[in-house]
């Protein structure tokens, strides 16, 4: 169910060939997924929301109206919230193994999957906006270390065009070329990041290793070390270009 993934529902295929909502999803996403399936006349596929899932071979081919309804559901920004500034510190970033789980309904459709993918690989986000008309999409990161890790993932690991993903301090804007959509750009990046989540979690742990909880690097120093580790991966053959 590609359109569910594009909307931000973290669907996965198990080793047994079943499709299900991933454990990386927010707990509220299970109920919201069932509600959305009901709205699309697909109540018989509630099994997608439980750990066992349902066989991929049994999944339906969605109609165009159903796809449109799924991709447009809950068109609301997550908004801005306050948080303790201590959460921006290296000690907090260093001990985190994941970002935060955000309910799909709190994320605008155009960037929901990218926000979810970021948080699955230790990029902690706290505010996002899908963009309107010609305005860019935007994701705010929780502090300089989360931003540095996100910038490394997008510009170095993915090798994305810096004119499509523009970083400024703790903010990333998604600026598609004329005629392109924010959602298409964001989903392409999200698919590659989320598919590599296990590798990227391990890489992040390695990149944090030189510094203890009380010996914080500068964000640019951390960014540079991430590039050093990436170069080592490439030299050892442990990196596959993602295209």
Image (tube, rainbow, N blue to C red):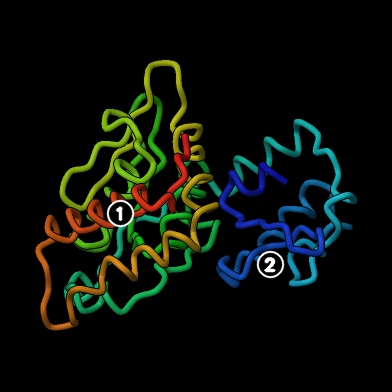
Q: Nearer the viewer, residue 4 or 164?
A: 164
* Residue at which label 2 appears: 31
Instruction: Tell me if 31 is positioned left or right of 137 in this view.
Output: right
The label on residue 153 is none
Are the residues flagged by discs 1 and 2 in contact, CB closer than 8 Å?
no
Question: Which x, y percent locates residue 229?
Answer: 28, 57
Label 1: state its secondary structure.
helix
Question: Which x, y percent locates residue 42?
Answer: 84, 51
Question: Which x, y percent locates residue 77?
Answer: 42, 50
At a point 47% along the width and 34% down the height, the residue shown is 243
Q: Nearer the viewer, residue 124 or 57?
A: 57
Q: Does residue 28 sit above or below 232 in this rendering?
A: below
Sequence-first disc among 1 and 2: 2
At a point 46% along the width and 48% down the height, the residue shown is 114
Question: Which x, y percent locates residue 242?
Answer: 47, 40
Label 2: state its secondary structure.
helix
* Residue at which label 1 appears: 232
Q: Residues within 10 Å of mark 1 (few under 14, many from 20)?
A: few
Q: Report how far apart the C-alphas of labels 1 and 2 lie in the structure.
A: 43 Å
Q: Nearer the viewer, residue 131 or 115?
A: 115
Which mark's residue is nearer the viewer, 1 or 2? Answer: 1
């Amino acid at each position: 169910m590609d359109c569910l993934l594009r909307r931000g529902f973290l669907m996965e295929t198990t080793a047994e060939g079943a499709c299900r909502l991933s454990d990386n999803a927010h707990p509220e996403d299970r109920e919201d997924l069932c509600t959305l399936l009901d709205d699309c006349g697909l109540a018989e596929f509630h099994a997608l929301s439980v750990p066992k899932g349902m066989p991929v071979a049994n999944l339906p081919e969605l109609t165009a109206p159903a796809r449109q309804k799924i991709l447009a559901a809950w068109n609301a920004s997550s908004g801005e919230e306050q948080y303790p500034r201590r959460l921006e510190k290296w000690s907090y970033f260093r001990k985190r193994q994941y970002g935060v789980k955000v309910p799909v309904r709190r994320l605008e459709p155009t960037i929901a999957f990218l926000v979810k993918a970021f948080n699955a690989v230790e990029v902690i986000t706290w505010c996002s906006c899908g963009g309107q008309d010609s305005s860019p999409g935007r994701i705010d990161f929780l502090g300089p270390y989360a931003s540095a890790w996100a910038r490394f993932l997008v510009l170095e690991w993915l090798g994305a065009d810096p004119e499509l993903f523009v970083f400024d301090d703790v903010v990333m804007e998604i600026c598609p070329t004329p005629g392109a959509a924010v959602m298409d750009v964001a989903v392409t990046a999200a698919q590659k990041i989320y598919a590599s989540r296990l590798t990227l979690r391990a890489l992040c742990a390695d990149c944090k290793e030189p510094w203890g909880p009380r010996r914080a690097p500068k964000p640019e120093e951390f960014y540079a070390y991430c590039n050093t580790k990436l170069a080592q991966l490439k030299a050892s053959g442990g990196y596959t270009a993602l295209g």
